[in-house]
Image: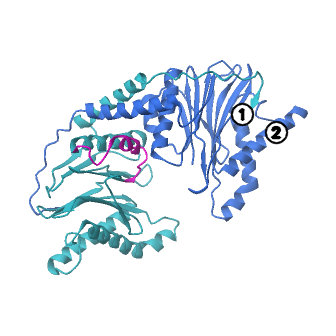
Chain colours: A blue, B cyan
């Protein structure tokens, strides 16, 4: 399984992905799910993938083939020559559909679903930063000021902390903490999501990678916030007022359906 | 959808269930998912259900029919005459299988799954308290000292707080807070789970209902801990040390796949 998330704030974008892939519990490998594409000063993109690893690799292979072809044939549409983030997301969606034409029928005839989801986050010069979720059908959905985060894969464990803590106006440094805490909740509750983690920060209008870090399981900062967060939650529960419910009387022997 | 949970601690059992049922977003009703059966001093059970409401109602109808029959025919096996919690859970599993024989083929022939899950928690005089998850196949799984909670329905949002905060040795009053906070994380992140909530507390060896409360959306205590918890989490994030990652240098124009 996978967990990837992309937070869009006024100050910039934070992306985090795990790197565990599994085909059954006895076939677990480490595979980065984050790819970064940069033309400094022009455009910067982070592409994250979840679902069937074969399908996401095939989507990325098609994207890379187009980039190679584009060097010889400038009219070929590719990831780095679309005019807007929206057009770039639609381009990625076309690649997903291309893979669908190639592989969907064969997968479905064996009872497997065509499962590939992507997050594309980034900025093109002269346009605002944006993040898109590209679905297996090739259509896409983007973040807004009122819905500033996107998640793919095992998203539920890490959603409550984002629902509570993140807004579009959250400072970028706080957003990095929230992204890592959201990932950490998932690591703790689901063994199919695992380190190392890839963390990327794109400051608004920098048009380059502001931070890119691979965080290993024993990383000092990750360990530190895991320990502080765990202890802090337990302290917070202890500080909650005790429930003061009245006891509800039951008749002896009563069956209350 | 549904979220029900059962926490087994040394001092007793805490059960919480939501009460939203939906067949599409335009057919939402309030339906308690918790039933309590008491023979004070002898046995006390809490039965919670998730999945297809028709199936869970049918399981409960079979259980109630057996209870009625048992009044005239003492040899009929029913919910309140099994010797142990394990046998009681297996009895409920038999009722699930009985519903399977009745309805599974018709559902599956229309592309619907046979989806019904139950939590049975309680105590029989002379035996320790226990909680069981009864699956759609009728088999069951029980809590242990090292795995002291069970969840059915939309369980992922509310799992991280339990993974962090609950052990078998957690005092019962703290367990009540954790159960409500776990439910509250789910309410906040998933609109298909909704109040009012049913809360039940069974103190070990009391063999009666210690607390049973219906908590409405505007309940003062629920509102209070929601507000304190939300504010506390935001404060906790702010207290985390800021990430101090080194910036990773990128070559201008580099494409980093």
Q: Position of residue A14 (x, y in %)?
A: 57, 28
Q: Which residue is mark 1?
A: A88
In-front residue for pair B171/A38:
B171
Side of A36 relative to A192 (left or right): right
Relative height, residue A168 to residue B226 (above, below): above
> Which label sits on residue B88?
none
Image quarter hosting the C terminus of chain B: top right
Name the residue rendered at 11%, 63% in the picture. A253
Residue found at the very far right of the displayed protein: A72
What secondary structure is found at the residue carrying circle 1?
helix
Give x and y (percent) for residue A75: 87, 33
Residue at left offset 28%, top offset 33%: B225
Q: Is residue B88 above or below residue A77?
A: below
Q: Would you name the residue on which mark 2 appears? A: A66
- Magenta region: B151-171
Q: Nearer the viewer, mark 2 or mark 1?
A: 2
Q: Chain of mark 1?
A: A
Mark 2 is surrounded, within 10 Å at the Cα level, by few (under 14), some (14 to 19) or many (20 or more) other residues, namely: some
- Marks 2 and 1 belong to one chain: yes
Residue B65, horizontal then vertical, whole percent? 24, 73
Which residue is depicted at the point 64% across and 40% down?
A33
Dot 1 alpha-carbon crowd within 10 angstroms: few under 14, some 14 to 19, many 20 or more = many
Q: Earlier in the sequence, mark 2 or mark 1?
A: 2
Report the residue at 48% width, 42% height from top: A186
* Camera-nearest residue between A74 and B143: B143
B245 part of magenta stretch: no
Front residue of this view, candidates A137 and A15:
A15
Residue B161: within the magenta?
yes
| Percent position of residue A141, x then y | 60, 38
A21 or A255, which lies in front?
A21
| Image side of residue A131 versus residue B4, left or right | right
Q: Is residue B21 left or right of residue A209?
A: left
């Amino acid at each position: 399984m996978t967990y990837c998330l992309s937070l869009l704030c006024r100050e910039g974008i934070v992306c985090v992905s795990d790197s565990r892939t599994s085909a059954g519990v006895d076939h677990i490998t480490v595979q980065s799910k984050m790819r970064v594409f940069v033309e400094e000063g022009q455009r910067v993109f982070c592409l994250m993938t979840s679902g069937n690893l074969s399908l996401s690799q095939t989507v990325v292979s098609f994207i890379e083939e187009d980039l190679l072809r584009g060097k010889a044939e400038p009219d070929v549409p590719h990831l780095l020559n679309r005019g807007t983030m929206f057009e770039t997301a639609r381009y990625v969606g076309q690649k997903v559909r291309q893979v669908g034409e190639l592989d969907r029928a064969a997968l479905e005839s064996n009872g497997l679903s065509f499962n590939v989801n992507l997050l594309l986050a980034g900025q093109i010069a002269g346009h605002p930063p944006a993040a898109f979720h590209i679905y297996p059908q090739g259509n896409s959905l983007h973040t807004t000021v009122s819905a500033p985060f996107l998640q793919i894969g095992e998203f539920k464990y890490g959603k409550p902390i984002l629902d509570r803590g993140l807004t579009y106006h959250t400072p970028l440094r706080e957003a990095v903490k929230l992204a890592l805490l959201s990932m950490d909740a998932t690591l703790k509750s689901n063994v199919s999501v695992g380190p190392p983690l890839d963390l990327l920060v794109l400051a608004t209008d920098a048009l380059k990678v502001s931070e890119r870090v691979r965080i290993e399981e024993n990383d000092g900062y990750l360990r530190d916030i895991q320990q502080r967060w765990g202890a802090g939650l337990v302290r917070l529960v202890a500080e909650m007022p005790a429930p003061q419910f009245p006891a509800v009387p039951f008749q002896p022997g009563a069956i209350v359906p």
